[in-house]
């Protein structure tokens, strides 16, 4: 078994990583930063996002698993005291792979620059560079839908629906649904300007094309990475063909994770 461990970088996460590496070596597992079959993130969901982007070119070959050193995560759902058990399970190679949808993003430019392709595990957002109102035409599956005015737009995956999307009033979507969700970030709605105002969930055969009106410098955030793009013609979002693979060693249903993260993890009861 070839593995690699990505740490959040704080003292606790680093020492768990070192301890795990020693145990994995003792179990004849090979540390391989280039072609790991399993990538373990130690930190939080943010660390798993980083690990995913480090290895998203191997999305069909690498499975992810997360250990959390802070509070319970959606991706990072193993506790530090369970690490020995996790290593045993990895050594046995006895795990199920579950797959969650990703977003495929294409930024089209109105100069000679080739379109840029990106992939998101949580979400992709679109805003202006100076926090001024984004004015953009929203096109759903080839049909003009609305002219949006506001702070920005967020397109999330089902597993990202518990992250930024939730704070924007989006729905929580079970990751077995191959869908993307479009949510507004502070839209302007009055007698003159109108948007639908509700989150929109699109199936995998639909796509969303957003064309800025008279604004060519656009800030995109894709998970934890923000990028400034010049001369943007449009940005296209759809459910990606690839899916992220998580190694599951025990059942931990999505709604249970939602309950334990947002309602109660039992510690106060
Ligand atoms: P960060 O500030 O460290 O992350 C923000 C929080 O989002 C952290 O508590 C993180 O959990 C949590 N998170 C990440 N993915 C999640 C998921 N799928 N479900 C539930 N919570 C999740 O920032 P970062 O490390 O750069 O991470 C970028 C992510 O932050 C973005 O993908 C976005 O979803 C999220 N974000 C949220 C808001 C908001 O809720 N208002 C605003 C901006 C960005 P951990 O502590 O376990 O890492």
Image (cartoon, grey):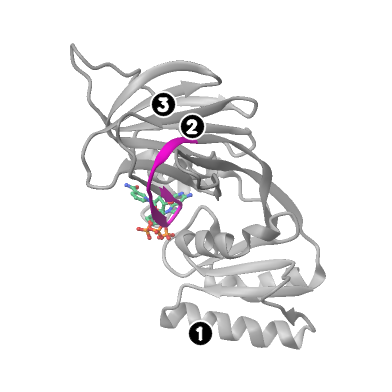
Q: Which mark is residue 15?
A: 1
Q: Which residue is mark 3?
A: 199
- Helix, strand or loop status at disc 1: helix
Q: Total marks drawn?
A: 3
Quote the CA–CA distance across marks 1 and 2. 38 Å
Q: Residues within 10 Å of mark 3 (few under 14, many from 20)?
A: some
Q: Which residue is mark 2?
A: 181
Tell me which corner region of the image, top left, top right, bottom left or bottom right, holds residue 210: top left
- Helix, strand or loop status at disc 2: strand
Q: Label 3 near label 2: C-beta < 8 Å? A: yes
Looking at the image, in which quadrant does ligand 1 appear?
A: bottom left
As drawn, is 240 to the left or to the right of 149? right
Q: Is residue 198 above or below residue 250?
A: above
Which residue is depicted at the point 63% across and 33% down? 178
Of labels 2 and 3, earlier in sequence is: 2
- Helix, strand or loop status at disc 3: loop
As drawn, is 53 to the left or to the right of 138? right
């Amino acid at each position: 078994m070839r593995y690699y461990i990505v740490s959040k970088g704080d003292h606790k996460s680093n020492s768990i990583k070192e301890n795990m590496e020693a145990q994995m070596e003792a179990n004849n597992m090979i540390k391989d930063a280039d072609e790991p079959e399993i990538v373990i993130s130690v930190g939080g969901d943010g660390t798993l996002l980083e690990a995913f982007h480090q290895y998203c070119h191997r999305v069909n070959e690498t499975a992810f698993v997360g250990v959390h050193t802070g509070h319970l995560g959606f991706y990072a759902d193993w506790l530090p005291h369970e690490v020995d058990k996790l290593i045993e399970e990895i050594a046995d190679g006895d795990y199920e792979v579950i797959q969650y949808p990703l977003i495929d993003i294409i930024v089209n430019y109105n100069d000679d620059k080739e379109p840029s392709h990106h992939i998101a595990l949580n979400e992709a957002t679109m805003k202006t560079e100076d926090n001024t109102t984004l004015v953009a035409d929203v096109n759903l599956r080839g049909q003009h839908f609305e002219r949006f005015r506001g702070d920005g737009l967020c397109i999330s995956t089902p597993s990202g629906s518990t992250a930024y999307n939730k704070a924007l009033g989006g729905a929580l979507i079970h990751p077995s649904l191959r869908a993307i969700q479009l949510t507004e970030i502070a839209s302007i709605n009055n007698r003159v300007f109108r948007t639908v105002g509700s989150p929109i969930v699109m199936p995998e055969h639909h796509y969303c094309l957003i064309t800025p009106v008279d604004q060519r410098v656009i800030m995109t955030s894709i998970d934890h990475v923000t990028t400034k793009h010049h001369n943007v013609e449009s940005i296209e979002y759809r459910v990606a063909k690839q899916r992220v693979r998580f190694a599951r060693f025990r059942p931990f249903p999505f709604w249970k994770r939602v309950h334990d993260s947002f309602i109660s993890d039992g510690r106060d009861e």
